[in-house]
Amino acid sequence: MRKISQSTVRRLSLYLRFLEQSDAQGLTTISSDELARRGGTTSAQVRKDLSFFGSFGKRGLGYSVPALTARLRDILGLKRSYRVVLVGAGKIGGALVQYQGFRQRGFHVTAIYDRDAQKIGTRWNGLVVRDVKHLEADLKKEPTDIAIVVTPADSAQDVVDRLVRAGVKAILNFAPVQLAVPPDVVVKTVNMALELETLSYALANR
Amino acid sequence: MRKISQSTVRRLSLYLRFLEQSDAQGLTTISSDELARRGGTTSAQVRKDLSFFGSFGKRGLGYSVPALTARLRDILGLKRSYRVVLVGAGKIGGALVQYQGFRQRGFHVTAIYDRDAQKIGTRWNGLVVRDVKHLEADLKKEPTDIAIVVTPADSAQDVVDRLVRAGVKAILNFAPVQLAVPPDVVVKTVNMALELETLSYALANR
């Protein structure tokens, strides 16, 4: 498959959300204009994004909602479910564990780790917080697809190195630090301050 | 100023972080190669990104760390501080209020709102949670630059409509819904499930 950019992947996710809502409302076709509005882009961009993956639309008729939904779920790797471990039982971690959107899309948090003795053994949303020193041994018995790292900045790289050695190939990082990983591991960093800076930029350049 | 894309703004934020770290380490110049590594891009892209704003680099010498830092802070609107109100005193809201990264970059949370009588009046990181029904009256007396919306999906649009009518021009949205706003208002939506989907895409297309 042709390599597509992260911004294209994000738009595909947005199209998919809108298609699912449209399907729930009983709509069977959708235009590139409508998808464009949802994805914050142009209909030309929508057609270009989707043309990477073959021909879906019929001129004048738009896209078939069920066919395009199925194809996008396939492209985005959402036809299966994913095991997710969370490292760092802090406030952001707590919010994430309870986040319904994850489970709805097939992402299942199967274990939570921390190094704080006061947190280890406590229950979080039905899961018992485990001692992070057992991370490697646990991952050997129960491999995971994705790890979410919500540790303080100064311990994030060490945790990531351990996850990578244990075979984890995809990491969602909330620690405010850039992480070094081998080329076969994908890291996505969510940095709240960075999001605010896109707003300050917009305010400063009106 | 020439209009630049959101992905360029994000890279500028990453360059700035790296410049600040380099400055703290006593470095005075930096190459486009190093900035590229930090921004997850190529040195050609770095030169293109920075050329939007004038000429900074000297061939063979790289960029001046203090000069480029100051210029990027200026471009990103970070030479001033911003007032931020938070609507929704839930778990994600609680994590955000305590997030040091915001304050360090000049984003100050000045008020928190909720509609839950059990939360109104309680203290959150030195701030008393206010009744969201006072939102408009408060914003008249104390205008804000940015609002962070962390409400459930079904009340987010209503809250945003009220914020917009009260003159708020920049919104960071964590509710899992696309928001409609007038063209002069900028919204940035952070969707955790969407971030995970960029990982599932990567895992499915290795």
Image (cartoon, coloured by chain):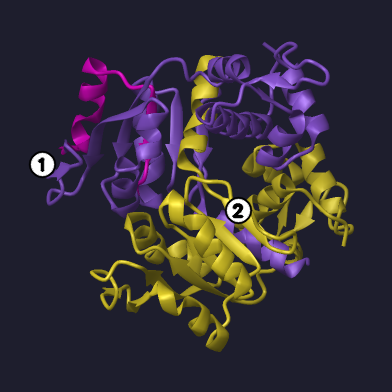
Chain colours: A purple, B yellow
Q: Is residue B69 above or below residue A119?
A: below
Place residue B168 in its image quadrant: bottom right
Element type where label 2 sits in the image? strand
Chain bearing tag 1 is: A
Which residue is under mark 1?
A121
Place residue A127 in its image quadrant: top left
The x and y percentages for residue B189 are: 56, 50
Q: Residue at position x 54%, y 67% from top?
A: B147
Which residue is under mark 2?
B188
Q: Is residue A77 above or below residue A170?
A: above
The x and y percentages for residue A94 are: 28, 48
Task: Looking at the picture, tell me which residue is in the foreground, A150 or A103.
Answer: A103
Q: Is residue B151 above or below residue A138?
A: below
Q: Residue at position x 71%, y 41% from top?
A: A37
Q: Same chain, marks 2 and 1?
A: no
Place residue A82 in its image quadrant: top left
Q: Which residues are magenta?
A: A128-151
Q: Residue at position x 22%, y 37% from top?
A: A132
The x and y percentages for residue A97 are: 30, 41
Of the 4 image quadrants, the one containing the N terminus of chain A is top right
- Horizontally, residue A34 falls left or right of residue A125, namely right
Answer whether labels 2 and 1 touch (C-beta < 8 Å).
no
Q: Amino acid at mark 2?
A: Lys
Element type where label 1 sits in the image? loop
Task: Looking at the picture, tell me which residue is in the foreground, B120 or B13.
Answer: B120
The x and y percentages for residue B106 are: 55, 72
- Horizontally, residue B125 falls left or right of residue A186, namely left
Chain bearing tag 2 is: B
- The answer to if A130 sits in the magenta stretch is yes
Q: Amino acid at mark 1?
A: Gly
- The answer to if B82 sits in the magenta stretch is no
